[in-house]
Image (spheres, grey):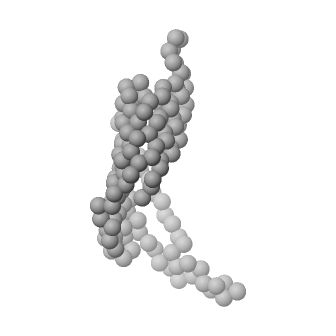
Amino acid sequence: MRPALFEVYHDPLANIAYRITAGAGVGYYVFDQTGLEWTLFVGPGYQYTRFANVETNESGYADTPAGVLNSKFKADITDRLTFIQNWQSILTDHASGQYTHHAITTLEFEIKQCPQTKANGDIPEKSDLYLNVGWGVRF
């Protein structure tokens, strides 16, 4: 659960030199039990966007109040496989883009290994190997 939000965003293809969003809010645990967690977050914020290029006599920035909505769902499918869904929407005025949505779906799989004991007798963690695979869609 998070009581505050701070995000910096850069997208030259969308003519955004940088966008800063800050906010605070309240959260609620829909589920909070072993192997199943779902949290919701809502609150007000502020967003400042600096555009990379603008036409003559146009403003090079936009600033606006914002509303932030966030949902995070996490479920253990097995002892080693976890499903995580994180979704966020930021609602702003028209000059700032009106709204943005961001969703991330993750399947987290823990790989166990049998590490060699170190010379000082310490045994490394059995799950210190990570594989990250990403995929993006833009529309």
Q: Residue at x 45, y 46 (%)?
A: 24
User: What is the count of numbered marks?
Assistant: 0
For the point 64% across and 85% down, the residue is 122
- Is 53 placed left or right of 28 in the picture? right
The answer to whether one can see residue 11 in this image is no
* Residue 88: % across, % down: 37, 46
Residue 104 x, y percent position in the rendering: 38, 52
Q: Is residue 73 above or below residue 128?
A: above
Residue 139 visible to an observer of this rendering: yes
Which quadrant holds residue 97?
A: top left
Determine the residue positioned at 36% across, 36% down: 91
Front residue of 54 and 57 = 57
The picture quadrant where one finds residue 38 is bottom left
Q: Residue furthest right?
A: 120
Residue drawn at the location 46% of the way across and 36% of the way down? 46
Along the line of sight, the residue nearer the viewer: 111 or 70: 70
Residue located farthest toward the left when viewing the structure as drawn? 30
Quarter of the picture containing the N terminus is: bottom left
**As drawn, 22 above or below 79:** above
Residue 119's x, y, as percent? 70, 86
Q: Residue furthest top?
A: 57
- Expressed as whole percent of the image width and height from the top left, the position of residue 19 reads 51, 35
Q: Residue furthest bottom?
A: 121
108 lies above or below 64: below
When the figure is inspected, residue 132 is found, relative to residue 123, above or below; the finding is: above
* Quadrant where the C terminus is found in the figure: top left
